[in-house]
Amino acid sequence: MGKIKLKMAILFVLLLCLGAGYLYMNGMKIEDVPTAIGESLTNNDKDYTIYEYTITKIDGDEYYGQAKNGTKIIFSGKKFEDDVADLKKGDRIKAYFSNEKRIDGLIKVVKVVN
């Protein structure tokens, strides 16, 4: 009985190695393998370059912001993920830019909750 368990354990380890080798050879990462609930294991923030700004001016549907290092941003309320009525002067926001498609510019804006 002990020899059967040992052989099964060795077979299981070999199958795991074979599966890992297959994934490696096909260029798949662990982040690409879906979980049981259909979500990816990857952190979505890795897909973006994120900058933090403070809202300095609101002019209609245009919002002006400035980072601590002096860089400025102007964006439309359409890019804001939450209700724009919640956004006011002095609020901190995070601006998400795509790492892959930089030409598209700003992807989304999210208010930073203290």
Image: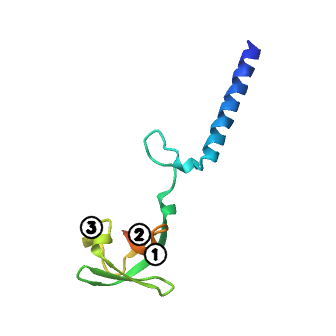
Which is nearer the N-term, disc 3 or disc 2? 3
Identify which residue is drawn at 48% across, 71% down: 50
Identify which residue is drawn at 44% across, 46% down: 39
Q: For this view, does 50 lie left or right of residue 17? A: left
Kindly state the secondary structure of the residue where label 2 is placed. Answer: loop
Residue closest to the far bottom: 70
Numbered label attached to residue 112: 2
Residue closest to the far top: 1
Q: Distance between the residues labelled 1 and 3?
A: 19 Å
- Identify the residue position indicated by label 1 in the image: 52
The quadrant of the rendering that contains the C terminus is: bottom left
Amino acid type, callout 3? Asp
Q: For this view, does 35 lie left or right of residue 107? A: right
Residue closest to the far front: 26
- 50 to 10, vertically: above or below: below
- Identify the residue position indicated by label 3 in the image: 83
Amino acid type, callout 1? Glu
Q: Quadrant of residue 104?
A: bottom left
**Dot 3: few (<14), some (14–19), or many (≥20) neighbours within 10 Å?**
few
Identify which residue is drawn at 76% across, 16% down: 3
Kindly state the secondary structure of the residue where label 1 is placed. Answer: strand
Front-most of residues 111 and 26: 26
Q: In which quarter of the image is residue 4?
A: top right
